[in-house]
Image: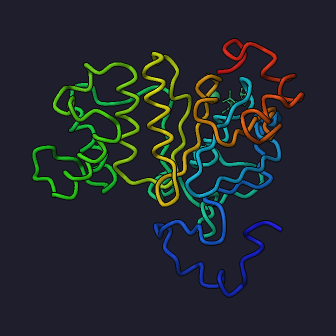
Amino acid sequence: MSFLQSLTDRERVFDFLIPASSPVDVRHGPILYLEDVTVSFDGFKAINDLNLTIDDGELRCIIGPNGAGKTTMMDIITGKTRPDRGSVWFGSRHNLLAMNEPDIASLGIGRKFQKPTVFEALTVFENLELAMAADKRILPTLTARMTGETRDRIEEVLVTIGLTELRQRPAGILSHGQKQWLEIGMLLMQRPRLLLVDEPVAGMTEQEMERTAELLTGLAGKGKQSVVVVEHDMGFVRSIARTVTVLHQGSVLAEGSMDQVSNDPKVVEVYLGADPDEEAA
Ligand code: ADP
Ligand code: MG
């Protein structure tokens, strides 16, 4: 029985009164729940009966060969792509398939794309300020007086992403890794509940990867964020992994600890047997 089916009628009957922007409800189960999700592009099933459950505060790694459907899965969660069938729920309250992309984002689902998209001419501080303003759907006026609350949040995020010292420098001078952290910081300004991160360590130095591992593991936790990381650097995945989900041909091929999945013959055959850097993207 799925967690949705386990809800009583009494708990669900007033759902229509709940505004879409109300907070995620994780009292009855997971923060993210995909059931039997399928999407085809020109007859090709990029996602095929996909089932995925992410618990509140969990850090989940998703691996899988190139074309496995990892990015398409994120597109479905964020409302960019509509599946042909299936269900996608954010907590027990929000049916994501009934919502559009901006509304899903404002629920507290933040997505980090592979390429950093910071504003290079603005300072690190101003980039964070801009991210906060965007949330309030007003045009950012960087000269306007900032609330103490915004300033406090920026300071907090600067510490989290390790860029306090560089706050007044233009983002353009940051290293590739620092830009990635700044972009994660921009997502954090809006206090998301779920972060989807696509290949965060591509192009990073060893040291930047270690720092990113600390950052992502520190973000995950109950009452903080749940974090879903798609990554094909296996060393990095091993360093942060709790539960790993292996996607293959749009479905879950295996799920478990890094050791469990990397010893699974099915996984070895489709993925780990090949050079991951050749095979995955
Ligand atoms: P991954 O991120 O795991 O490498 P993707 O989700 O990007 O895989 O792609 C899964 C499959 O779906 C690939 O074969 C890809 O070519 C196809 N695909 C993804 N998006 C589209 C689209 N918008 N139109 C057509 N085919 C697509
Ligand atoms: Mg991809």
Rendering colour mode: rainbow
Residue visible at 44% across and 56% down in the picture: 106
Q: Residue furthest bottom?
A: 10
Residue 132 lies left or right of residue 55; in this view the side is left
Q: Is residue 122 shown to the viewer in this render?
A: no
Number of numbered discs visible in the structure rendering: 0
Residue visible at 57% across and 59% down in the picture: 99
Q: Position of residue 159 (x, y in %)?
A: 29, 41
Residue visible at 83% across and 68% down in the picture: 1
Q: Is residue 110 shown to the viewer in this render?
A: yes
The quarter in which the C terminus is drawn is top right
Query: For residue 250, which quarter of the picture?
Result: top right
Q: Position of residue 144 (x, y in %)?
A: 11, 50
- The correct choice, above or below, for 251 with respect to 57 in the image is above
- The correct choice, above or below, for 174 with respect to 12 in the image is above
Residue 26 lies left or right of residue 272; in this view the side is left
Q: Position of residue 198 (x, y in %)?
A: 56, 33
* Ligand 1 image position (quadrant): top right
Query: For residue 196, which quarter of the picture?
Result: top right
> Which of the two residues, 68 or 164, is positioned nearer the viewer here?
164
Q: Position of residue 114 (x, y in %)?
A: 51, 28
Residue visible at 27% across and 41% down in the picture: 128
